[in-house]
Image: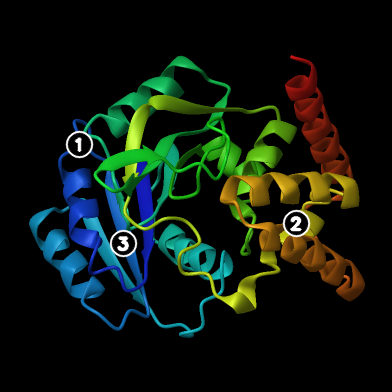
């Protein structure tokens, strides 16, 4: 099974060496690793290029874009640039430049795909450093496949029509995979170090994007309120709940374009409600 990995990177000189070292140290390396430098003003491109000179399976591209931080969209747009240069593959991966993989990551992932032909998406778990310990990054359930470390079977990736260029892309892809009868799996034994906690670079101007994402996924208002409450509770941030709900309402008023069709939205709501019922009555 041919494995192609794409890393969108913007100003990652602090983390990129450790990240790429963990790729080089893999028991089974990807067939190709494409690092796409997105308008960096630091040494990201230089660092990536040094690795490419030493390892023929590493490629480096440069992209010129706006300096504005646009959560979700910029990273997906940069990923798609790398995708255009990807060789023929069976499995495609979207990884971040601020992670450190355990050496058996790809070996284990490939074994999962080989042993289950219905598996469309797979990942390990993200851990962040608190004081001197690495602890689970508790912003999602452990069965949620996180955006910085996920792999897609090519057939699944094509069925879901790739990634949506906005916040929420790494949730709607999972839901659409299930809509198309693919299975998803997180291997809790694979602990990936996340050097920069999620959301650290979000600005106050982006505070409504979570609510917009729920609207675009056709969650509906009640389900969006439940999801917003859960996020705020996990983050211990009451304002996150209020901003998410306001973001949803503003998206309704502005009639923003959706991520999914009405039929897909119906499936997503049903799937989410079934998950809530299982947790309440288990």
Using the rendered view, name the quadrant where residue 264 is placed. top right
Label located before the other in sequence (3 or 1): 1
Q: Quadrant of the N terminus?
A: top left
Q: Residues within 10 Å of mark 2 (few under 14, many from 20)?
A: many
The kind of secondary structure element at disc 1 is: loop
- Res. 263 mark: none
- Sort mark 1 into few (<14), some (14-19) or many (20+) by Cα contacts within 10 Å: some
**Split into 4 quadrants, where in the image is the C terminus?**
top right
Could you tell me if residue 36 is visible in this image?
A: yes
Q: CA distance from mark 2 to mark 1?
A: 35 Å
The residue to which callout 2 is attached is 259
Of 53 and 69, nearer the camera is 69
* Residue at 46%, 42% in the rendered image: 150
Pointer 3: what residue? 35
Find disc 1 in the rendering and name its residue. Answer: 26
Residue 75: image location, x then y, percent:
49, 65
Task: Specify whether 64 is left or right of 178.
Answer: left
Mark 3 / mark 2, whichever is N-terminal: 3
Residue drawn at the location 46% of the way across and 64% of the way down: 200
Q: Is residue 49 left or right of residue 245?
A: left
- Of residues 197 and 212, which is closer to you in this image? 197
């Amino acid at each position: 099974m041919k494995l192609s990995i794409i890393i969108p990177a913007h100003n990652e000189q602090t983390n990129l060496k450790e990240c790429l070292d963990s790729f080089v140290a893999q028991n089974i390396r990807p067939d190709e690793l494409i690092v796409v430098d997105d308008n960096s003003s630091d040494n990201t491109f230089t660092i990536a290029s040094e690795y490419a000179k030493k390892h023929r399976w590493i490629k480096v591209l440069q992209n010129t874009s706006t300096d504005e931080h646009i959560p979700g969209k910029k990273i997906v747009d940069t990923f798609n640039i790398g995708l255009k240069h990807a060789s023929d593959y069976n499995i495609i991966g979207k990884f971040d430049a601020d992670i450190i993989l355990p050496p058996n990551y790809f070996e284990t992932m490939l074994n999962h795909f080989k042993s289950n032909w219905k598996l469309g998406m797979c990942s390990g778990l993200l851990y962040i450093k608190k004081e001197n310990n690495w602890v689970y990054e508790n912003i999602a359930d452990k069965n949620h496949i996180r955006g910085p470390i996920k792999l897609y079977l090519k057939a699944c990736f094509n069925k879901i029509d790739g990634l949506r260029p906005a916040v929420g892309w790494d949730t709607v892809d999972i839901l659409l995979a299930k809509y198309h009868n693919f299975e998803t799996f997180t291997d809790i034994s694979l602990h990936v170090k996340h050097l920069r906690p999620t959301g650290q670079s979000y600005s106050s101007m982006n505070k409504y994007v979570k609510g917009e994402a729920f609207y675009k996924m056709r969650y509906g208002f009640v389900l969006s309120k439940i999801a917003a409450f859960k996020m705020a509770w996990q983050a211990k941030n009451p304002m996150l709940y209020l901003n998410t709900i306001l973001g949803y309402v503003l998206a309704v008023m502005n009639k923003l374009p959706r991520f999914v069709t009405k039929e897909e939205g119906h499936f997503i709501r049903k799937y989410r409600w079934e998950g809530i019922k299982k947790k309440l009555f288990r």
